[in-house]
Image (cartoon, rainbow, N blue to C red):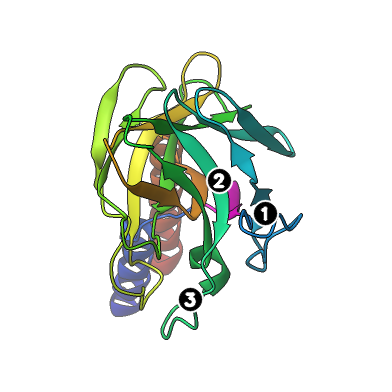
Amino acid sequence: MRMKSGIMVLGIILVFAAPISAAPLLQVDIGGNFATGAPSQVVQPGWENFFLHELGGGSGSTSYTYGAITQSISTTIYGATVGYTFDTGPYPGVTIPDVYDDAAVGNAYGGGGGMKIEFSGLTAGQQYSVEMWHWSANRSGVNVDWYDDSIGHVLIGNFATAGALPTSDTDYKDTFLAIANSSGQLIFSATGPSAGVFSVNGLRLTAVPEPSTMLLLGSGLAGLVGYGRRRMKK
């Protein structure tokens, strides 16, 4: 009996120790076909469509609403952002090829322009995990600094946007955490470069479970362990 009880307790502890991952709130395939002016892109199955044609230098914004969440992409002064299809596949080892095969491409025009991505309709103060894919088939692609402007102006990282063909779903993908501001917004911006292009292929947004939720789960599991022990003794 004691051994069985120990095995049950160990099993519950292992379950509790494993990371708890929530389902994504939103995963968006970003792209378009600027070259042909086609009204749509090939969307990765199971992802939402964010079709982008062109945002001219200095102004312009495109928004889509998915349930309670609205996502927008805009361009900053001296820049231009277009939806673009690369058509460079297949991509061996990649399970989301349609995400990689098109993107919102920012062109700095040599003037240090940029791109802004905003999510609204979120829970104020909630922490979110953001996954960003940012590959471009354009040979003049450059590294670009991305910032979290939701509350302050915090550097997230310097992301590579061009290189060899992706061979897995994690190539040219970065994951970072951000907290929605008092208006329920997440705001990210890329500034510069002084020349060249940079891109965003897709975004996945997931709410991070709060510590209080984890604590309640842990307390519940502890109660189950104690209950199991008492039953074993009887």
Whether 161 is drawn above or below 165: the answer is above
Can I make out residue 198 in this image? yes
Foreground: disc 2 or disc 1: 2
- CA distance for labels 1 and 3: 22 Å
Q: Which residues are magenta?
A: 22-31
Residue depicted at x 39% and y 32%? 114
Q: Residue most toward the top?
A: 182
Q: Secondary structure at mark 2?
A: strand
Q: Which residue is mark 1?
A: 48
Q: Amino acid at mark 3?
A: Thr
Q: Quadrant of the N terminus?
A: bottom left
Q: Which residue is mark 3?
A: 88
Q: Which residue is mark 2?
A: 82
The number of numbered badges drawn on the structure is 3
Indicate left or right for 215 with 163 as reference. Answer: right
Upstream in sequence: badge 1 or badge 3: 1
Q: Amino acid at mark 1?
A: Glu
Packing grade of label 2 (10 A; few <14, some 14-19, many >=20) is many
- Front residue of 172 and 11: 172
Residue depicted at x 54% and y 73%? 87
Residue depicted at x 43% and y 35%? 210
Q: Quadrant of the C terminus?
A: bottom left
- Front residue of 209 and 99: 99
Whether 70 is drawn above or below 102: the answer is above
- Front residue of 202 and 219: 202
